[in-house]
């Protein structure tokens, strides 16, 4: 990549920057400020269901008075009711366990792909990407029929005599793990494959020539060199998994606490917009750390390649 | 890596790909099940596909979804391509890091946050919600994906052709349409397709930003799924899976053919020289 050089900019050049920039400011950044403001408001029986509402037409005096009505009450409420902090903790734990399981399953796949004959690789790559294009909702839904008590997995296990009683998997955390691993597997395999494929094979040959057993060569050479791919893949699974809604809602049980689901219920069932905004703000604050770490890491990789 | 695969590699590939594909294959098979009990095989039948044709609510939802996906993917492709050009070409400008942050953040941001924040924006703007608000929401998150896809195409771009055109007095806009766009077109097309399928799939953001009269297909599927697994839903899902798979395969074959053609052209060109 070229060094970004200062470009002399024409009117057209400025327009090119301005159009996507302004779009994102209005539809991405401004909404967060509104969420933050509403998280400091109170619930009200009104349309929209919160007070105070800012009306620029009523002038500065009213604006300042309204500012005084904002309070951190919703945030205090989040600390008092243990539903919320339990949801946050259990989301992070579930996402962490799932990320680890995805890595355990994804690493051998990426490794196998990188070791396969050159002519086969584009096809394998395509096979990994293809499920990513098919609907997320459909892929989660497909598991319901498999994991149900009278589902296909239990039928199979009963038929071959491994179990006598159907296993209860659907509506438990195990089903949520399976759903997350299944849905996010391509996100982990792709960056991992990219870094494994680039690995210099002569290093492994040298190790072998010097009498290093294959498992030790893997541990000392392959694994450390694939670490950037491992880290990138884990972030890509972990960050969205924390805020996941569809998977815990369809596969999890009533005792599966995940913050995405809590936010959804708070908003659609309890119609408490201020509290759900506060939930979103805290979730964002939790995720900012991994998101920033992820972007730094991506930048480092990009710089190394340049 | 150059060494051949071991039995361990082969096994992990076979197991891995079965894990990825088996659930979808089972879903497709059971959409042809005669029995209403989805997990008991009762013989082959296409009756659920026929009953879909008479389900007007579902067809309405499908039509809304297709229109939303088409409009939002098209706008997102224009905005996303512009954003990619800015990221790769525009050098330094004030607020550049904010700009790239706003491009990359939506890729990992939980959908519940994006949906909630956009809904609150529309409420604050006193905008009645429906078809157009879903389009605005989908355009916003899809343009970031388009930007990333097009950006990767732009990075490996030979700038000398553009510079030659500009040295010969070609205005920038014309250079873009005559030279840059044809070269990055595969990326732009891939970006459009990605934006289209993302919009087609989205449940969470659409649920937040929609209003009366604009129920999308995923919302319809979701509300049915909550009531239980039915063969009709299997049939809808099968149709979607088949359509998307055919689209992706066709697109990748087209790109590959284009590449082969390009290589052949280059070879003939060099052959003529020598």
Image (cartoon, coloured by chain):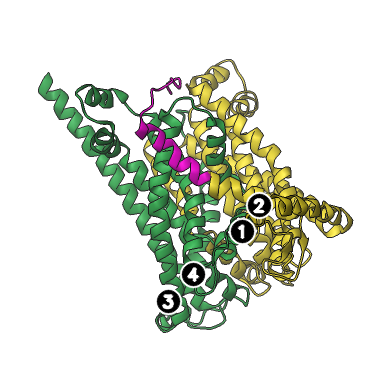
Chain colours: A yellow, B green
Give the extent of the magenta segment.
A1-24
How packed mark 1 is, by other alpha carbons closer than 10 Å (few <14, some 14-19, many 20 or more), is some
User: Do the dots labelled 3 and 4 sit on one chain?
Assistant: yes
How packed mark 2 is, by other alpha carbons closer than 10 Å (few <14, some 14-19, many 20 or more), is some
Q: CA distance from mark 2 to mark 1?
A: 8 Å
Residue identified by numbered label 1: B124
**Position above or below: B144 against A78:** above
Q: Which mark is residue B59?
A: 3
* Residue extending farthest right: A80
Asked whether, in this view, residue A224 is left or right of residue A21, the answer is right
Q: Which mark is residue A34?
A: 2
Q: Determine whether the residue tagged by mark 2 lies in a helix, strand or loop.
A: helix
Given contact means CB atoms under 8 Å apart, are the residues at marks 2 and 1 in contact?
Answer: yes
Q: Determine whether the residue tagged by mark 3 lies in a helix, strand or loop.
A: helix
Chain letter behind tag 3: B
Residue identified by numbered label 4: B217
Residue at the image point whose x is 43% and y is 20% from the top: A5
**Position above or below: B156 against B208:** above
Pinpoint residue B98: horizontal percent, then vertical percent.
57, 35
Q: CA distance from mark 2 to mark 4?
A: 29 Å
User: Do the dots labelled 3 and 1 sit on one chain?
Assistant: yes
* Residue extending farthest top: A210
Residue at the image point whose x is 52% and y is 45% from the top: A24
* Mark 1 or 4, closer to the camera: 1
Q: CA distance from mark 1 to mark 4?
A: 27 Å
User: Do the dots labelled 2 and 3 sit on one chain?
Assistant: no
Asked whether, in this view, residue B189 is left or right of residue B43, the answer is left
Question: In which quadrant is the C terminus of chain B drawn?
Answer: top left
Q: CA distance from mark 3 to mark 4?
A: 8 Å
């Amino acid at each position: 990549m070229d060094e970004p050089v200062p470009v002399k900019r024409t009117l057209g050049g400025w327009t090119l920057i301005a159009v996507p920039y302004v779009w994102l400011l209005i539809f991405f950044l401004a909404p967060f400020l509104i969420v933050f403001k509403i998280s400091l408001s109170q619930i009200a029986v009104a349309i929209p269901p919160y007070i105070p509402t800012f009306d620029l037409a009523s002038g500065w005096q009213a604006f300042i008075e309204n500012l005084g009505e904002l309070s951190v009450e919703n945030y205090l409420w989040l600390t008092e009711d243990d539903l919320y902090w339990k949801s946050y903790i259990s989301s992070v734990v579930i996402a962490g366990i799932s990320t680890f399981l995805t890595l355990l399953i994804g690493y051998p796949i990426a490794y196998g792909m990188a070791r396969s004959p050159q002519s086969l690789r584009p096809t394998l790559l395509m096979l990994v990407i293809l499920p990513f294009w098919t609907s997320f909702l459909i892929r989660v839904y497909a598991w319901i029929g498999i994991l149900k008590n009278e589902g296909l997995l239990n039928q199979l296990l009963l038929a071959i005599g491994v179990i006598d009683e159907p296993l209860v998997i659907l509506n438990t955390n195990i089903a949520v793990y399976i759903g997350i691993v299944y849905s996010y597997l391509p996100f982990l395999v792709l960056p991992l494959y990219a870094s494994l494929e680039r690995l210099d094979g002569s290093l492994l040959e040298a190790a072998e020539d010097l009498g290093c057993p294959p498992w030790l060569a893997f541990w000392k050479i392959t694994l450390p060199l694939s670490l950037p791919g491992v880290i990138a893949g884990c972030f890509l699974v972990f960050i969205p998994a924390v805020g996941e809604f569809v998977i815990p809602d369809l596969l999890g049980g009533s005792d599966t606490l995940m913050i995405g689901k809590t936010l959804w219920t708070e908003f659609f069932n309890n119609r408490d917009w201020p509290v759900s905004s506060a939930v979103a703000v805290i979730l964002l604050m939790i995720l900012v750390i991994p998101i920033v770490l992820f972007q730094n890491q991506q930048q480092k990789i990009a710089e190394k390649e340049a | 890596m150059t060494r051949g695969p071991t039995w361990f590699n082969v096994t992990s590939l076979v197991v891995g790909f079965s894990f990825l594909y088996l659930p979808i294959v089972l879903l497709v098979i059971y959409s042809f099940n005669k029995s209403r009990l989805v997990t008991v095989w009762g013989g082959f039948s296409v009756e659920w596909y026929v009953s879909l044709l008479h389900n007007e609510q579902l067809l309405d939802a499908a039509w809304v979804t297709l229109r939303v996906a088409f409009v939002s993917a098209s706008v997102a492709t224009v905005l996303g391509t512009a954003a990619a050009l800015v990221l790769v070409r525009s050098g330094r400008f004030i607020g550049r890091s904010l700009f790239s942050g706003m491009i990359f953040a939506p890729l990992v941001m939980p959908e519940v946050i994006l949906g909630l924040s956009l809904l609150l924006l529309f409420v604050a703007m006193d905008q009645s919600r429906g078809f157009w608000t879903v389009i605005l929401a989908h355009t916003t998150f899809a343009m970031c994906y388009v930007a990333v896809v097009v950006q990767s195409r732009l990075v490996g771009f030979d700038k000398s052709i553009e510079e030659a055109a500009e040295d010969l007095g070609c205005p920038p806009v014309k250079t873009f349409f005559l030279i840059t766009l044809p070269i990055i077109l595969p990326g732009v097309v891939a970006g459009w397709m990605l934006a289209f399928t993302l919009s087609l799939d989205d449940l969470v953001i659409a649920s937040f930003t929609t209003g009366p009269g604009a129920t999308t297909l995923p919302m319809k599927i979701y509300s049915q799924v909550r009531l239980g697994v039915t063969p009709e839903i299997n049939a809808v899902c099968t149709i979607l899976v088949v359509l998307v798979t055919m689209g992706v395969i066709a697109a990748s074959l087209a790109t590959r053919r284009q590449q082969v053609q390009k290589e052949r052209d280059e070879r003939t060109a060099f052959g003529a020289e020598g």
